[in-house]
Amino acid sequence: MKYQLTGEYEIKIDAKGRIKMPANLLKQLTVSTGENGSYDFVVNRGYENHLILYPQDVWEKKTKELNRLNINIRKNRQAVRYLYRGATQISADSSERVLIPKNLILYAGIEKNVVLFAYLDQIEIWAKSAYQQMIDEEPVDFAELAEEVFGDKSKEEDE
């Protein structure tokens, strides 16, 4: 399944480690419901000190990519270990909340205020303070960054 998730949502995590998924975000995920009608995800560590919530079908696609790596090569083995370490399957309950494992909450430094940042086919989960710090460290000249990253794509055809 191909997603084009979008949105930035400020929410709170409860004392048990549950976050309520915003209705607008769930509307974008209707195709990822499991057999029992719940929303099924895998949550894991992100590349920075945040978490990534993957719809179950997206995680399955990522694991197929990982499984193609030759684990006899040390860097591949390290990448596979890192990407699987902490990965936890979770489902939304009847109140559309997901329970984030405590070890991942600690990894991301999440306390009470959380930002969900949805893009492409994943949802980043940030401690609000860490998210704000990441934004504050963004380059001053986004136009320069965009030019460097995207170059001249005007001649390429749309896919």
Image (spheres, rainbow, N blue to C red):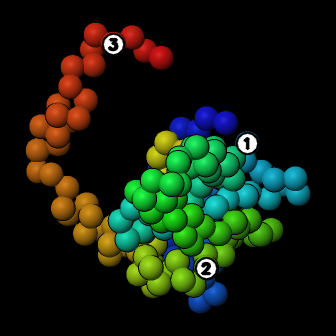
Residue 156, compared with residue 131, is above or below; it is above
- Callout 2: SS: loop
Q: Nearer the viewer, residue 55 or 4?
A: 55
List the single residue furthest toward the front: 72
* Identity, as a three-letter code, of the amino acid under mark 1: Val
Q: How far across and how far down the image is residue 107, in percent?
A: 44, 79
* Identity, as a three-letter code, of the amino acid under mark 3: Glu
Between marks 3 and 1, how big is the CA–CA gap?
A: 31 Å
Residue 125, compared with residue 24, is above or below; it is below
Q: Nearer the viewer, residue 42 or 32?
A: 42
- Callout 3: SS: loop
Left or right of residue 37, residue 70 in this image? left
Task: Tell me which label, 2 or 1, sits earlier in the chain.
Answer: 1
- Callout 1: SS: helix
Left or right of residue 101, residue 146 in this image? left
Q: How far across and how far down the image is residue 82, in percent?
A: 48, 65
Mark 2 or 1: the one toward you: 2
Query: Which quadrant holds residue 111?
Result: bottom left
User: Residue drawn at (20%, 55%), measured in percent from left and top?
Assistant: 138
User: Residue drawn at (17%, 34%), measured in percent from left and top?
Assistant: 148
- Tell me the residue that label 3 is attached to: 156
* Label annotation for residue 101: 2
* Label annotation for residue 31: 1
* Label annotation for residue 94: none
- Can you say which quadrant of the picture contains the N terminus? top right
